[in-house]
Structure formats: C-alpha cells, structure tokens
Image (cartoon, rainbow, N blue to C red):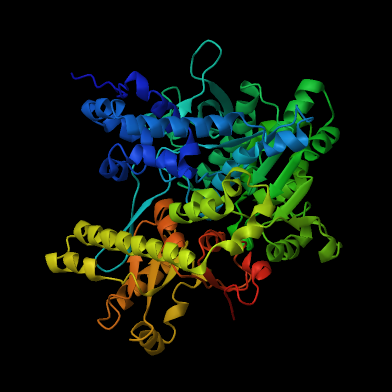
Amino acid sequence: MYVIRPFTVVPSLPESLQFLEQLAYNIWWAWNQEGIELFRRLDSDLWERAGHNPVLMLGQLPQSRLEQAAADEGYLAQMERVKAMLDEHMTRKSWFDKNFGHLADISFAYFSAEFGLTEALPIYSGGLGVLAGDHLKSAAELGLPLVGIGLLYRQGYFRQYLNADGWQQETYPGNDFYTLPVRQVATADGKPMTIDVEYPGRMVKAQVWKVQVGRIFLYLLDTNMDENSPEDRQITSQLYGGDMENRIRQEILLGIGGIRALAAMGITPTVCHMNEGHSGFLALERVRRLVTETKMDYLSAREATRASQIFTTHTPVPAGIDRFPGAMIEKYLHPYFSQLGVSRDEFMALGRQNPSDPQETFSMAVLALRTAAASNGVSKLHGRVSRAMWQNVWPGVPDDEIPIGSVTNGVHTRSWISGDMAALLDRYLGPRWSRRPEDHSVWQRVDQIPDEELWRTHERRRERLVQFARNRLATQARNRGAAANEIMSAGETLNAETLTIGFARRFATYKRATLLFQDLDRLKAILSNKDCPVQVIFAGKAHPRDNEGKELIRKIVHWARDESIRRRIVFLEDYDMNVARYMVQGCDVWLNTPRRPLEASGTSGMKAAANGCLNASILDGWWDEAFQTGLGWALG
C-alpha cells in the first residue's frame, strides 16, 4: 500500500526579498502597477503562466532567479519603493479617520456570495462579484472599518472554451488554497479556526480563511474538511453549483456561518450589509443570538437587529431571485422556530410577499427586505424597477413611497485604469488623484492634458489589446487542434489602427449580444469600409445551463467566419478580469444593448469610461442617469 501525503512547497526567499511574501498575500498589489511590476520583473512569462498569482509564482521560481534578484540593486530599490507605498497605505490617516475618527467602535460586515478581487483568486462569476471586490478595495483606500464575508470555493466558477462549432464548453479546475493569496485564520493557541453550523441531523464544520485587501480583511468559509461527510464537503465545492438543496446549504453557511465566524473572531459588526439575498439568513442568526443570549423577546430582537442591517438588490426580474419551497425551509431551519419563539407560519411569513399564502415559496429577497432597515437598487432606474417589483411586500403603499432607494454602483478606478493612463494623470494631476480618491477637486485640472498626449496614450493601449487578442486567438486555435494555417492567421486578425468596438459581458439573452447582426449586409459594409474601417471584439460566458445564451455565442463565431469580415470580428474565450482589463483599456467604443430596464446597473461601461473609451448604450442601468450629449451615445 502506498500512502499519499500532501506537501506544500514554499519558496526559500533570501533575507533581502522577504517583503515579496508579505506583498504576495496582500491584494493591495493588484491595484498598484509598481507592485505588479515587482513580480513581473522576476519572470514575465511565469507571471502569465501563473495566472498573475504571485503566491503560485514565488513557489515556482528557480532559487537561482531569487538569488539573482537579491543581488540586483535596481530591483531592490524598486522593492523598497513598493514597500514604502504599502506602508503609507497601511498607516496613513485615512478619509474615515479624518471624518469619523470619533466613531472608534463602529464596524461594517459586507456579505456576498462572490468576490472578484483579482483573476488570481477565482471565486467570482461576473458583475456581482467584481462589484463586491471593488467595494472592498474602495473601503480599504478610504479606511472604512469593514470586513468582507464570503465562501472559499474549491472550484470557483467555470473556465470556458469553444469547440470547433463555436459551442461553449466548461471545465472546472480546482483551486489549491495553499498556492492562493489566502491564509487560514488561527485561534489563540495557533490552531486553524473552525465554526459549527447546524444542518438536518448533523453539525457541519467550516474552517475560516482570510484574504488581506490593503488595510482590511475578507473572511471566507470552507467545508472541505475531513471531519465532514463527503456530501457536506461539497457545500463549498462550486460557486452557484449543484442543485437547489446545495444552494440553500451554501446560503445557510454564508449567512448563519458568517455571523458565527465573526463572533468566533471577536468581531461584532455595527452594521451588516447583505449584497443580494444570498446572505439573508444572517438576519435570523442575529435575532436568535439576541433571543437566546439576552432573553429578549422575538419582536424586540427583530427590531433591534433590523436597525443595523442593509440590503442591496441587484436583480431586476423576479426569476433571478433565490426561492425555496416551504418544506425545504422547514427541513433546514425548523430549529429556529423554537429558538426564536415563533410558529412555522410566522417564520415562513418572513420570506413571502403575501404572508398568509401557504403556497408561496420562501424568497431570500423578501427575507432581506423584511429584515433590513434600508434597501436599495443599484441605479436610479433600478430603484424604480425594484419598487414596482416588490410593491406587494407593502400592499396599499404608493410606488414612490415604497422604502427601496437606490445607490448607483461604482468601480474601483485604480483596479481598471491602464498603467499608461495612470502615468499620464500622475504627470498632469499629480499623485492626489490616486492617493486621495475622496478628493474630487483634483479632476478640475483634467482639461490641462493635451489632446495629442491623451490620444497617443490610447493608441498604445489599443495596440496592446490587438496583440493580446491575436495571442489569445492563436492559443484558442491550438487548443482545439486547428490547422497550422488557421493558427498563423490569428496573427493577421484585427488592426491596431482601426476603430475598435468592445462587447464583453455575461451572455444572457436579455443583453442581446447579436443585436449588432440584425442587418448583416449593413454591418459588413461598415466593417469593411476602406476609409473608416471598424472591428468588433466579443467576450463573455453563458451560464452552463443557458443553451439560449450559448447559441448566441455560436452564432457570433459562425458570422465571424464570413470571409468578408473574418479579420474584423473575433470572440475571445474565457472572459475574466484579465481579459476585461485589456478590453476596457484598449477599445474605442463600449457597446451595451440590454433590453431596458433589465440592466440593473452595468459597471463595465464605467471601467471603459475611466480609460477614455466612449459608451454606446441603451439608456438602462447607470447610463440612463450618466449619459450627456457629447459623452457617448444613447441607443434606442
């Protein structure tokens, strides 16, 4: 018999390079170009192969290369600059300190099912997760006393590739937590911290991991432990994976387990923020703790916790909300009936628009709405849509008085702006635009940037986008066993001097990715115009069970094979944060064609705008309130 044991390989860093390990485990590097360059400079090819993951990269670097860097005075000088920048971020008096320093005991807990901080930590699927990641980064820069709470998935979201017919295929590579920028949280005696969450007939253990995001932390729960059954180890196997049964297990772990993890670490949040309804069960756990620990009655405890809970909804259609049958809620949460001191019907009423309808399913959004002191959509238009969508929760109340407001989403600019643009802004605005994001007065000087310099900066980024797309297309062709001539032709696709339109987002049918092809002859004429040619780059994933979305991708791939436009339209596989950065930084026009009003916010256009890319969009989501004549185009 052979005994297989796991081993974790860690780099043996020379004394002078010890800072690299500290930097690798702080996601601060992901929005600081000099920090990224510090790793890329060690081995640019390995940096790409490692998926921009510095922890994995350091474990794979030859010792000789590390010794060489340790003797390189230029490299050490750059490392000292980066160290000084990180120290300044960690210790400076922040915006929060200056304005709210007297609120020493306040803290916020931000719950989300996914967080998109960097492609090196693939525990996100799309806009919701990237928004949550940008939220944490912005909080770190502003110095908010905030912690994030989520789940650490063994497989994360799927990787996409297309077969020869253009049909989307999925793979699910595993995440090796020991080569990711995450670390286990330890107890006072140095052991890995775990918490217990009750499921029908058993207790499930979850270990707690942490990700440092500048000066704040994201805590992630993981059930893949030997103490758990094989079935329970699968709870955190896949982001949005499995059936409805596994979904409720995940959401119990996120909401209830998240509150217990915070308590185990001695963190008592002043406010809990539910980013979508996935974490709605946290409200039940907070009420239960008050009832059982302070002997407060249920109604008083519910009002006390409600005052410190916020809910953000991102969904403009009822079909996008998680709903569970009453029998499933009873199966998993019946202990709460007695612990809260409520009947089954009273408990079920928390998740029903009509509390007296026994046939209605239990809605996580309704639970969040009923247990939050404040609820909001993610744009002004989405706020109006949400008030209309949930008016039955407040029967008889006029639409404009329904207590759902709006806070329009934003983006963390430094994560998405190109190095070239950042350098240009540094030159003409000074460093205050990046080091003091709360100070908007600095942008009054932006008109001082000469048009010629701005355009040259943009042209360099378009050149990089075209080269990136060519390399990616060649890799796609090789991976599906294409002929040598097809692989070579990837190097002739697109033109670095041609007006470039970008369309990159989730391939849901309401986003209408193929609207551009409704008049194919006209499109061909525009793309092949000799005086003013145009080219289009597509990217995005369809949900694994969304065959209609997959069909849209297949159609685009087939249209792109038309000889007259073959070099003018491309589809880039496996859309992620890395692909997104190249596209929002290098495209000239950002195209968005959702069916109004189904785009709750849509932040990719904001990232493009921050890089000087013009938006051409349906008046939906954020663009409905941001559009001004001369600053892009309003479609429809």
Q: With 7 as the anchor, is 436 left or right in this view?
A: right
From the viewer's perspective, is residue 501 above or below residue 277? below
Q: Quadrant of residue 475?
A: bottom left
Q: With 491 as the anchor, is 616 left or right in this view?
A: right
From the viewer's side, name the closer residue of 352 and 6. 6
Q: Quadrant of the C terminus?
A: bottom right
Q: With 111 as the anchor, is 121 left or right in this view?
A: left
Residue drawn at point x = 60 percent, y = 27 percent: 261
From the viewer's side, name the closer residue of 220 and 196. 220
For residue 25, say whether it is visible.
Answer: no
From the viewer's perspective, is residue 129 above or below residue 90? below
From the viewer's side, name the closer residue of 478 and 578. 578
**Count of residue discs:** 0
* Most distant residue in the left direction: 484
For residue 70, say whether it is visible.
Answer: yes
Residue 1, position in %: x, y? Answer: 18, 18
From the viewer's perspective, is residue 129 above or below residue 400? above
* Most distant residue in the top direction: 189
From the viewer's side, name the closer residue of 484 and 226. 484
Residue 501, position in %: x, y? Answer: 43, 72
Residue 484, position in %: x, y? Answer: 13, 64
